[in-house]
Image (cartoon, rainbow, N blue to C red):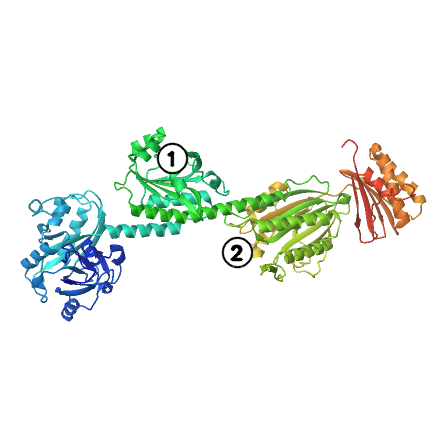
Amino acid sequence: MDSTPGGTVDGRVPEDLAVVVDAGGTVTVWSDGARQLLGYEAAEVVGRPAAGLLAADLPESARRHVTVGRRWATEVALRHRDGGRVVVQLMGTPLADGDGGRPWLVTPAAPERVAGPVEPDAEALWDLTLAQLPVPVAVYDREARLVSANEIMTQVMGRSVAEMRGLTLWEMEPNPPFDEYDRLQRQVLRTGEPVFHENFGQAPGEVRNHAWSMFLSPLKDKSGAVRGVSAAVFDTTEQYWARRRLAILNDASLRIGSTLDVTRTADELAEVAVTGFADFVTVDLLESVALGEEPEPVPPNQPVTLRRTAQRSVLAGCPESVVPTGATTFYPVETPPMRALVAGRGTLTAAGDPGMQRWIDSSRGRAEAVARHMIHSVMMVPLRARGVTLGLVHFLRHRTAESFSEDDLLLAEEIVARAAVSVDNARRYTHERRTALTLQRSLLPDRPPDLAAMQVAYRYLPAGSGADVGGDWFDVIPLSGARVALVVGDVVGHGIHASATMGRLRTAVRTLADVDLAPDELLTQLDDLVVRLDREEGPQTGGRAEAPTPGEVGATCLYAVYDPVSRRCTMARAGHPPPAVVTPDGEVRFLNLPTGPPLGLGGLPFESVEVELAEGSLLALYTDGLVEAADRDIEVGLNLLRGALADKAGPLEETCDRVLRTVLPARPADDIVLMLARTSALDSAKVRTWELPRDPAAVARARKSASEQVTAWGLGDAAFATELIVSELVTNAVRYGDDPVVLRLIRDSALICEVSDGSSTAPHLRRARVFDEGGRGLLLVAQMAERWGSRQTATGKTIWAELGLPGD
C-alpha cells in the first residue's frame, strides 16, 4: 500500500476496517479500523455520501461490477481527514436490505484478489468471509440451523461453533429477541429476499447493551434455489447513541418552555431527561428565582437555600427523593452541589467518589436512598442563563447499568442550557406580570362604596397566564348633590406601561369629576391628556423625540353621571362599547349613544346623552374583552350579554357571576371589566326646593325655611350651621348672581345645601383683611362644612356644601 500523510502508522490496512454503504451511496456503518485509516470519527461520516471520501474515481472495472451488483476488488485512492491521499486495496461485497436495495460492504482485499473481480466458489467465499470480515458472521442451512460462524460471532454469542452447530437461534437462546431473529431467518429462506433488521440489547456473550444492525441474505445455488441464509451483524452502538442524543435534544426543544411558568418549565426539563437518559432528575432553583425575583449571587463561603421545584423518576412517586417538591433544601459549603453552583460548570461523579460520598453521608435520608436504590452515577449541571446562576439540576442513574459518560454530560449541559433560558424568561415574565397586576389592583377600587343613589357590584378579570396584564379600569365616584359617576375604560396595550397609563387616566378622571364637568367635557379634557402623553412618550431617535403618531397611547372610555333626585343619567363614550339598561320589568336594551372617537386622536367632539331611568333599573358597563373574541362576532357576545341580563332579577353579585358564566369567551385574550349598578330614587320627602327672588330680604326667609326643614327632619343640632351656610350662599347669589336663584336641601348620607343661580361666574375663596366689611362668606362656609364646591349647570352654576348628620 502506498500512502501519503494521513495513512496508517505501520503502513498496513487495519484488519478490522469495515464500511457499509447503502444503495443511495450513503455511509451507514463506519468501523474503528476505518477511523484509524482515514482519521474520521463515525459521527463525521455516517449519513454522508461515500463519494466524499474518494481522492480519485473508482477504476472502470470496479464501476462496472458495482453497476451489475457483483463483488469487486481493486486499489482505491482515498482522502484522509487532514487532506492527504491514501491508496489502499479494498474489496466490495454486495448485500441486500428489506426494501430491495443493494448496500455494499467494503473491507480490505487480499493482494492476490486485486487483479480483478473473481467468481469464487462457495467454499472459497465462505473462507474469505470468515477470514476477512471483522464483524460477526454466521451461515445457516435450509432449516435455519447453524452451519458455521466466524470467531467474532462466537464471542458475541458466548459459545463455540461446536456448541452451536446444528441448532436454530431459538434453540440456542429461547428468549426475546432471538425468537424474532429466528422468524426473520425463516422468512428469508421462504421468500428468498434479504432482510435488514436493527435491535438494541445485550448479546449472550456481552456484558452491556449494544446496537446491532443485522443483514440476513439468502444463499442461492446456480439454479436460484435457496440453500441457506447468511447473517452479517454490525455493532452500531456509537451511531445509535448519537441518534438518540439528537432525538433527546429535539424533544427538549419541542417540550421545554411551552409555558411562561417557572414550575412547569422546570418539570418539563425533568420529564425530558427521565424519558431520555436519566433514571432520576431533580431541579433545585434559588429561592429568589422560584419566587420570580431577580436571582441573587451565589456566595462561595456560605450555605445556599434552594427550592425543590421539580423532580421526576422512572419509578412511580419518586421514591429516591428525600426532599418533597416545593420544599427547601440546603447546600453546605464545600459540598459537590455547592462547588458546581459556584463554578457554574457541570460535574460527572460516581456515588463512591470521596467528595460525593461525604455529601451523601451528610444526610441519613440521602444515604439510605442511595443504598436502597443502588444509585451509582451522578451528574450535577447548573442552570445558567445570561451569565447568571438560577439553580442546579441533578441527574442520577440506578436502573441503567452504564454510568454517565462525558457525552452524556455534554448532552445534559445542552438541555439544561436551553431550559435555563426558558426558566429565566418565565421568571422575568412572572415578575413583570406580578408587578403590573399589583400596580393595577392598587389603582382599582377595593370595594363598592356605600351609596344611596345606587347599588354597585363589579368584576375585574385579568387576562390568562398567556398574556400580559392590560390597562382596563373602572371607578365609582360620589359627586355633589347625592349624584354618582360611573366610569369604565380600556387602555391600548398590555404590561406595566398600560397599567401605569391606566393609573394616570383614572386619577385624571377623578380630578375632573371633582370639578363636576359634564361627561362630554370630561372626555374632551381626557382626550387632551392622552394626546399630551402621546407627545411625551414619542420614540427617541438620535437623542431627540420623533414626532409621535396620534393614537400610539390610546384608550376608550365610558363616563356616566346618575342623579337620584331626577332619576336622570347623563352619559358619553369615547370609542367604548355601549352600556346596557335593564328595566324593572326585565327588558334589556343597549343605549344608542354617539360613539365618539377613542381617546388620543385629538380635536374631535364628544356628545352627551341624557336618559331617564326608572327606579330599580340595572345599568351594565363593561370592556370589550367581555363580548369580543377571535372565534366569534361581537354581535354574538352582545346577544349572550342580553340573555344573561334578562334573567330574573337577583342580587347583583349573583348577576355578575351569571353574566361571566354565560358571556365569557372560552379563552379570554384581554382583561375584562363588568360593572353593574342598580339605581335608586331619592325619596321626595328628603328633598326640599325654594325659588328665591334676587332681594336681600330673601336671605332671612331662606334661612328661616332651611332651619324649619332641618328641624322637621329631626336634625335640629345642625340647624345653626345650616342657617349660617344658607345665609352666606344665598347672600352671594343675590348679590353677585343672576336669576333664577334656587335653594335646595337634600337629606342623604350627609345634609346637602345647594344654592343655584343664573350666573356662570365661579366663586373663589379669599382671606379678608381685618377692616374689610365682606369677603368672609365662603371662608365661613368652608369652616362649617365637611366639604364644599361648585359646579356648572345648563343655566348657570350651583354652589354646594355638605354637613355631617348629627350622631355620625
Circle 2 residue: 630
Identify the element where label 2 is drawn.
Answer: loop
Q: Position of residue 703 (x, y in %)?
A: 89, 40
Which part of the image, by quadrant, shows the N terminus?
bottom left
Q: Position of residue 378 (x, y in %)?
A: 32, 39
Point out which mark residue 295 bears: none
- In depth, the one of 458 and 264 nearer the eye is 264
Q: Return the disc, 2 or 1, that comes first in the chain's sequence.
A: 1
- In depth, the one of 305 and 422 nearer the eye is 305
Identify the element where label 1 is drawn.
Answer: loop
Q: Position of residue 374 (x, y in %)?
A: 28, 34
- Amino acid residing under circle 1: Glu
- In depth, the one of 399 and 545 nearer the eye is 545
Q: Position of residue 453 (x, y in %)?
A: 73, 43
Which part of the image, by quadrant, shows the C terminus?
top right
Hey, which residue is sitting farthest front in the picture?
Answer: 5
Image quadrant in which you'd find residue 358: top left
In the displayed structure, 646 sits above or below 6; it is above
Circle 1 residue: 334
